[in-house]
Amino acid sequence: MKLVTAVIKPHKWEDVRSALETVGITGMTVSEVSGYGRQKGHTEVYRGAEYDIALVPKVRLEIVVDDADVEAVTGVIVSAAATGKIGDGKVWVSPVESVVRVRTGDRDEAAI
């Protein structure tokens, strides 16, 4: 099992969610987060005054999938979230040693 974590632009969330449903992913954890990457935020103008936005709003997705589904899930996220501009986000994959469903006590693949 693997944990697929993605940080994407908030306006791409619905596109990514719809795309994940096409590959059979219906369960995930979604969080609203803030951060910055290489660009260190950005500058905006409000009523003629320029100011710095240090933390950019993002959406973080976390999905536990079988090893066989990792490539399909990451590919769908990347294609649906891409705008071609700086700050599109990142996707990373981490190993998962064990999963337990709290309600039933199911473990590992049965808990996904």
Image (tube, rainbow, N blue to C red):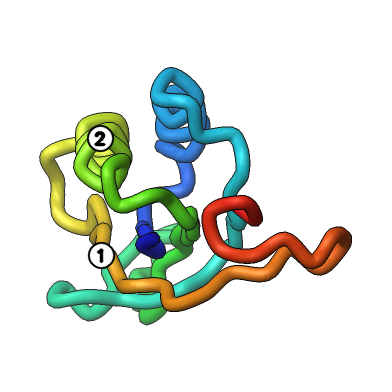
Q: CA distance from mark 1 to mark 2?
A: 13 Å
Q: Is residue 5 visible?
A: no
Question: In the rendered structure, which disc, 1 or 2, sits on the residue that comes first in sequence?
Answer: 2
Q: For label 1, count other residues whose C-alpha is less than 10 Å away and answer few (under 14), some (14-19) or many (20+).
A: few
Q: Is residue 74 left or right of residue 19?
A: left
Q: Is residue 66 left or right of residue 101?
A: left
Residue drawn at (25%, 35%) of the image: 72
Residue drawn at (25%, 65%) of the image: 92
Disc number placed over residue 72 in the picture, else none:
2
Disc number placed over residue 107 in the picture, else none:
none
Instruction: Quickly name the residue at label 1.
Output: 92
Q: Residue furthest top?
A: 22
Please state the horizontal and vertical placement of residue 75, each as a whole percent of the image: 20, 37
> Disc 1 on helix, strand or loop?
strand
> Disc 2 on helix, strand or loop?
helix
Q: Is residue 17 left or right of residue 96?
A: right
Query: Looking at the picture, does residue 63 appear above or below residue 5?
Result: above
Please state the horizontal and vertical placement of residue 21, each as a whole percent of the image: 50, 24
Q: Residue 86 or 68: which is nearer the viewer?
A: 68
